[in-house]
Amino acid sequence: DTGVSQNPRHKITKRGQNVTFRCDPISEHNRLYWYRQTLGQGPEFLTYFQNEAQLEKSRLLSDRFSAERPKGSFSTLEIQRTEQGDSAMYLCASSPVRTALSTGELFFGEGSRLTVL
Amino acid sequence: RKEVEQDPGPFNVPEGATVAFNCTYSNSASQSFFWYRQDCRKEPKLLMSVYSSGNEDGRFTAQLNRASQYISLLIRDSKLSDSATYLCVVEHYNQGGKLIFGQGTELSVKP
């Protein structure tokens, strides 16, 4: 399967613990996105990368959240000192670099569901 | 105010009905527009892009009104398999292609 892969699929943690999610994008895709989704809401933008460069981080995101894409391939999203409000589905998506000829389609992984107790 | 706003759902319609979803966006710099579909407990997937001249894909028709900053999706002859959440999405070229999603409108097609 050459789609976007996310691990772990489910994570249950206690408040105050740190968690890390990994995303492996489609191999030829330069862009990688992280979104968060809660029940009844659309995906909320967190951050995105072009190759290894982090182009933007949501202003709504606290300093407890950090993402990396060190070699321009896989990415990690770390949440430090988790809070119950961090419980959500964390979605990763990838896409080729946007050009006039590309569709702009994002290819999503199945997500990593975080539950903070 | 959210940057992309959609009709609140859910929409409950019988098979064969025509249903329309509306979406407005606040950032006039938005350059590209899409409708994504998300099945229950699944990831979002692209349904169709939205072009200025309007475009059709089978039973689905998308319209864009840049002056009003309004996007619509029309589904004709609804099928049970159309039941899903429909997400309106805008992209900002001048922000490097970040995609912003609306909150989604849930559609339930009943026999």
Image (cartoon, rainbow, N blue to C red):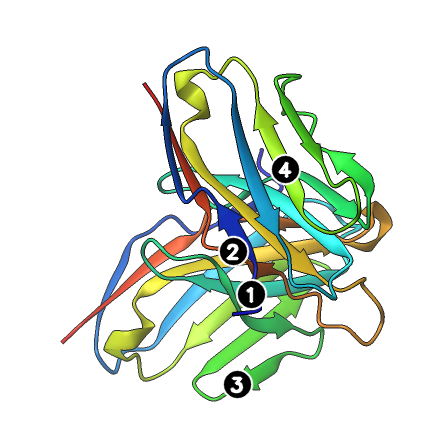
**How much space separates mark 3 and mark 1, taking CA atoms?**
25 Å
Q: Nearer the viewer, mark 4 or mark 3?
A: 4
> Does label 3 lie on the same chain as label 4?
no
Q: Describe the element under mark 4 as helix, strand or loop.
A: strand
Residue hosting label 1: A3
Q: Earlier in the sequence, mark 2 or mark 1?
A: 1
Q: Chain of mark 1?
A: A
Q: Which residue is nearer to you in this view: A38 or B49?
A: A38
Q: Nearer the viewer, mark 2 or mark 3?
A: 2
Neighbourhood count class around disc 4 (C-alpha, 10 Å): few under 14, some 14–19, many 20 upward: some
Neighbourhood count class around disc 2 (C-alpha, 10 Å): few under 14, some 14–19, many 20 upward: many
Q: Quadrant of the C terminus of chain B?
A: bottom left
Q: Amino acid at mark 2?
A: Gly
Residues at marks 2 and 1 touching, judged by CB atoms closer than 8 Å = yes
Q: Amino acid at mark 1?
A: Gly
Q: Chain of mark 2?
A: A
Residue hosting label 3: B57
Q: Which mark is residue A109?
A: 2
